[in-house]
């Protein structure tokens, strides 16, 4: 680990395994994706059929770098989806390279967010959020970006050498070759419509591409960022960049080290990434991930991965590559688990995590930042509803409604028309009225009076 800075030009030294995101609920120990020369070992796999007659485990490896993919003068792209690796239902991956000046045209993804790790080289990103905010960042080896679903973005190699980065998407059915690209859209739109939409003469569009260019060779951009054409400039846009390799390891062991970037460190990201260094001969101990799937990418070195699926079913895979002497281990998706019903009273904010289908704790700063981002993306303050509970104190309710009115809306529903909506509909169906049917004379004639409720502290 002392020689981390020896090979700064490639962004790597020693052996690294780069992977993405945590495991399936089937009790599997790791799902792996290989880089060049990846191959599955045959030893130990002869008896995959269990004594119970269950089918063997699915194939967990795919030679991503060995595939053909898309090849052009400006760069290349190779992808893995469920088509190539059916077991990878929740994660798709892409290995992309851009030549100096190579431009991955402006595009956006309708069904998946994008997480990226820079292996080598330098790249500039331009991103436009759905509410019109725009930003630019320059990335180098070890940096991470994250673009939420629906955020338009373009990527351009800065040189002086080829740029290589790994992309992860939180949907295994996503295809990099099926995104919404700007040239594809404009090329299939009549010139008169483009003229009216963009305020330019129809003759301007005569030389526009009539089909998707995907990656095109251009000139290396200047070091200074050009001014952005923003309709609604925002000074507080969420950053899309995190320097993972520059962060200190959160864990160091005799056998290696671990770096993690989660939403705690990178608020805009809903996918968690990690880089793990495994020294030669060392072992990442037996483990599994109950809340998410894992996707790995081997950048260099050699690794052996054993997968156990219960009922005596195991697979032993050997993965090989030929770069430096490091392993990277990268995890996408949320790895924290939280049993809401077993934690007593809530003492911190909670945020729903789609990948694990659980509410997970976040810090107050993260909660305010997340709420603020969604507030700013609304078309109107009246698109928000500020729900309040009857269990709140008068003081808290007063402050809450004051905040809502300062935001610009009077949408303040409470438990009388939200919590009791379901019970009101049920009572109407059963008794003909959704209101209480008890009057004071019932108290005088009843033999049994039952009071139900929750005591307030």
Image: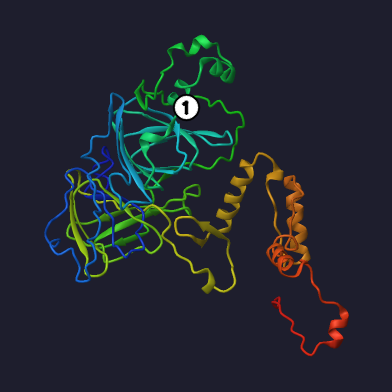
Residue visible at 59% across and 68% down in the picture:
346
Quadrant in which the C terminus is drawn: bottom right
Quadrant assignment, res 236: top right
Label 1: few (<14), some or many (≥20) within 10 Å?
A: few
Q: Relative to 188, is 64 above or below?
A: below
> Residue lying furthest top in this view?
203
Q: Position of residue 374 (x, y in %)?
A: 60, 46
Left/right placement of residue 130 relative to residue 444 reads: left
250 relative to 345 in the view: left or right: left
Quadrant hosting residue 445: bottom right
**Closer to us: 394 or 57:** 57
Q: Secondary structure at mark 1?
A: loop
| 27 or 372: nearer the viewer | 27
Q: Position of residue 362 (x, y in %)?
A: 53, 59
Of residue 428 and residue 32, the one placed in the foreground of this image is 428
Picture layout, residue 157 above or below residue 430: above
- Residue with the mark numbered 1: 225
Q: Is residue 295 shown left or right of residue 399? A: left
Q: Is residue 76 above or below residue 144?
A: above
How many callouts does the rendering have? 1
Q: Residue at x 36, y 21 (%)?
A: 218
Residue 224: tell me if it is visible: no
Q: How is the image coloured?
A: rainbow
Residue 86 in sight in this render: yes
Taking depth in this image into account, of 153 and 453 the one nearest to the observer is 453
The image shows residue 292 at horizontal and vertical percentages of 39, 58
Quarter of the view holding residue 42: bottom left
Q: Quadrant of the N terminus?
A: bottom left
Residue 24 shown left or right of residue 265 in the figure: left
């Amino acid at each position: 680990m002392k020689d981390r800075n020896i090979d700064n030009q490639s962004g790597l030294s020693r052996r690294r395994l780069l992977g993405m995101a945590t495991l399936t609920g089937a009790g599997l120990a790791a799902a792996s994706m290989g880089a060049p020369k990846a191959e599955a070992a045959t030893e130990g796999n002869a008896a995959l059929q269990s004594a119970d007659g269950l089918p063997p485990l699915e194939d967990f490896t795919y030679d991503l770098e060995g595939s053909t993919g898309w090849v052009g003068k400006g760069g290349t792209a190779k992808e893995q989806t469920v088509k190539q690796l059916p077991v990878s239902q929740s994660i798709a991956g892409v290995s992309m390279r851009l030549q100096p000046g190579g431009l991955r045209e402006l595009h956006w993804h309708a069904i998946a967010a994008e997480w990226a790790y820079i292996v080598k080289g330098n790249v500039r990103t331009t991103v436009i959020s759905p509410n019109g905010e725009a930003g630019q960042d320059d990335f180098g080896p070890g940096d991470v970006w994250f673009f939420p679903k629906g955020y338009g973005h373009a990527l351009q190699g800065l040189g002086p050498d080829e740029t290589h980065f790994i992309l992860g998407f939180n949907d295994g059915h996503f295809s990099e070759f099926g995104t919404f690209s700007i040239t594809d859209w404009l090329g299939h739109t009549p010139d008169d419509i483009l003229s009216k939409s963009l305020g330019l003469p129809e003759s301007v569009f005569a030389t526009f591409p009539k089909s998707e260019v995907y990656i095109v060779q251009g000139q290396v951009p200047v070091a200074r960022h050009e001014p952005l054409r923003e309709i609604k400039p925002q000074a507080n846009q969420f950053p899309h960049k995190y320097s993972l390799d520059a962060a200190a390891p959160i864990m160091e062991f005799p056998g290696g080290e671990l770096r993690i970037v989660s939403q705690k460190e990178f608020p805009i990201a809903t996918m968690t990434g990690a880089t793990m260094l495994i020294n030669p001969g060392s072992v990442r101990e037996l483990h599994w991930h109950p809340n998410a799937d894992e996707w790995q990418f081997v950048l260099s070195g050699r690794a052996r991965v054993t997968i156990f699926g219960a009922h005596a079913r195991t697979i032993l895979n050997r993965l090989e590559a030929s770069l430096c002497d490091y392993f990277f281990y990268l995890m996408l998706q949320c790895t924290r688990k939280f049993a809401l019903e077993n934690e007593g009273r809530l003492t911190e904010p909670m945020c729903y995590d789609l990948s694990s289908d659980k509410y997970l704790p976040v810090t107050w700063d993260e909660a305010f930042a997340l709420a603020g981002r969604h507030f700013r993306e609304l078309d109107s303050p009246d698109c928000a509803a500020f729900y309040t509970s009857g269990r709140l104190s008068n003081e808290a309710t007063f402050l809450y409604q004051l905040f809502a009115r300062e935001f610009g809306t009077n949408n303040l529903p409470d438990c009388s028309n939200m919590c009791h909506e379901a019970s009101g509909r049920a009572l109407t169906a059963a008794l003909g009225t959704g209101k209480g049917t008890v009057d004071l004379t019932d108290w005088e004639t009843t033999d049994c009076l039952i009071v139900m409720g929750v005591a307030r502290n």
